[in-house]
Amino acid sequence: MKNDRVIVWFRNDLRVCDQEALFRASQKYAVFPVYCFDPRHFEEGALGFSKTGAHRAKFLLETVSDLRANLRELGSDLIIRRGFPEEIIPELAISLSATAVYASKEVTEEEVQIELAVEKLLLSKKIGFELFWQSTLFHIHDIPWPISNLPESARCFYPIP
């Protein structure tokens, strides 16, 4: 199945170690890593402050550069685009003849809305979309009891299946 192509969409998890989407995709498919600089991240928020200040922007650029270098050490590379992921990712999937897009599951309302928009467009083109949980110290599948048994303060970090 290494002839099948999968895009791994990097979002807030800009690393190659302990990256479930990348690991799963690389086990069976030809992988095309992608990062999108979403212009919404550089707009003003509801309170009039920039969502991404100068220091955060510098850190993000350095992190994306480091991700690209780490992928190159593994014999791959990073496709970098600027634009709305819900437009870029489906267009790229079509142009690369990808059979699926893998990414990390996010939790904020804005990020979830973007996920849903990407998923809707991909599914309309019969391209798969799979999300992987990796936003907490413990993986959701490693907790030995139901999420509903966690204290309320911890439960908010885990999606209720």
Image (tube, rainbow, N blue to C red):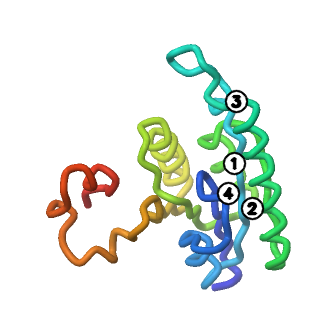
- The residue labelled by disc 3 is 53
Labels 4 & 2 near each other (Cβ < 8 A): yes
Neighbour class for label 1 at 10 Å: few (<14), some, many (≥20)? some
Q: Secondary structure at mark 1?
A: helix
Neighbour class for label 3 at 10 Å: few (<14), some, many (≥20)? some
8 or 52: nearer the eye?
A: 52
Q: Kindly identify the residue that appears in the image at 63 percent across and 85 percent down.
A: 1
Whichever of callouts 2 and 3 sits on the residue coming sooner in the sequence is: 3
Say if 18 sits above or below 14 in the image: below
Q: CA distance from mark 2 to mark 3?
A: 34 Å
113 vs 63, left or right, is left
- Give the percent coordinates (x, y) of residue 91: 69, 48
- The residue labelled by disc 2 is 96
Q: Residue furthest left?
A: 149
- Give the percent coordinates (x, y) of residue 73: 84, 76
Whichever of callouts 3 and 1 sits on the residue coming sooner in the sequence is: 3
Q: CA distance from mark 1 to mark 2?
A: 9 Å
- The residue labelled by disc 4 is 93
Labels 4 & 1 near each other (Cβ < 8 A): yes
Whichever of callouts 1 and 2 sits on the residue coming sooner in the sequence is: 1
- Give the percent coordinates (x, y) of residue 127: 55, 60
Say if 28 sits above or below 96 in the image: below
52 or 27: nearer the eye?
A: 52
Whichever of callouts 4 and 3 sits on the residue coming sooner in the sequence is: 3
111 vs 147, left or right, is right
- The residue labelled by disc 1 is 91
Q: Kindly identify the residue that appears in the image at 29 percent across and 49 percent down.
A: 156
Q: Secondary structure at mark 3?
A: loop
Neighbour class for label 4 at 10 Å: few (<14), some, many (≥20)? many
Dot 1 amino acid type: Glu
Q: CA distance from mark 3 to mark 1?
A: 29 Å
Q: CA distance from mark 4 to mark 2?
A: 5 Å
